[in-house]
Amino acid sequence: MSVVPTEHPHIVRSAASRGEPVVAGAGISVRAIVELMRLYADPVRVGEALPDLSLGQIYDALSYYHDHQEEVEGWITRNEEKANWLILGRGATAADAERMIARVRTARRDGWRPPPASE
């Protein structure tokens, strides 16, 4: 697999991303954009966090997510599992890792927002 286009003009799959959908030419995953939307709840703020992307690319990634929600949620879960593995590799216990992941999930559910970007 080199670069495989999708039905979304800005989103591709590539061997470099292990088949995970990414923004063409930028390599930023749809997963990462979705995670930032969960934090910021505003595509403009996501654009400020990812200044190399246009709003069109961000909206296309979000559109891809809504068309392929189960797939992208799978990538999010795999990323959490990898983070869990890394945490355990640093001497934390499985219970520590589960508590950290539970705190992140609770914060997302409760609508946690990061502090405003400094100007």
Image (spheres, helix red, strand yellow):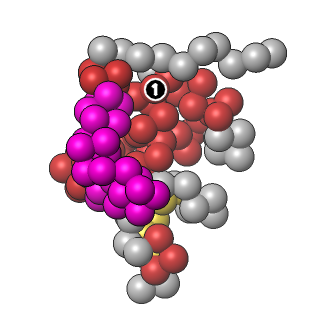
Residue at figure coordinates x 34%, y 36% from the top left: 100
Q: Residue at x 46, y 58 (%)?
A: 90
In the image: residue 23, left or right of residue 111:
right
Camera-nearest residue between 39 and 10: 39
Side of 107 relative to 116 (left or right):
left
Find the magenta span and give its range: 78-105
Q: Seen from this angle, which residue lies furthest left?
A: 70
Whether 63 is among the magenta residues is no
**Local crowd at mark 1 within 10 Å, few (<14), some, or many (≥20)?**
some
Q: Is residue 108 above or below residue 82?
A: above
Residue 70 showing in the rendered view: yes
Quadrant location, the C terminus: top right
Counting from the top left corner in percent of width and height, residue 84 is at 34, 53
* Residue identifier under label 1: 39
Number of numbered markers: 1
Q: Quadrant of residue 57?
A: top right
Q: Residue 74 at what x, y percent from top left?
A: 24, 55
Above or below: residue 9 compared with residue 45: below
Using the rendered image of the protein, determine whether residue 76 is visible from the camera's viewpoint: no
Q: Is residue 96 magenta?
A: yes
Residue 99 sits above or below residue 107 on the image: below
As rendered, which of 29 and 117 lies closer to the eye?
A: 117
Taken as a whole, is the magenta stretch helix, strand or loop?
helix
Task: State the residue lying farthest toward the right.
Answer: 119
Disc 1 marks a residue whose amino acid type is Leu
Quadrant containing the N terminus in the rendered view: bottom left
Q: Is 105 left, or right, of 70 in this rendering? A: right
Q: Position of residue 42 (x, y in %)?
A: 50, 21
At mark 1, the secondary structure is helix
Q: At x 63% / y 63%, what residue is drawn?
A: 25
Residue drawn at x 53%, y 27% as measured from the top left: 43
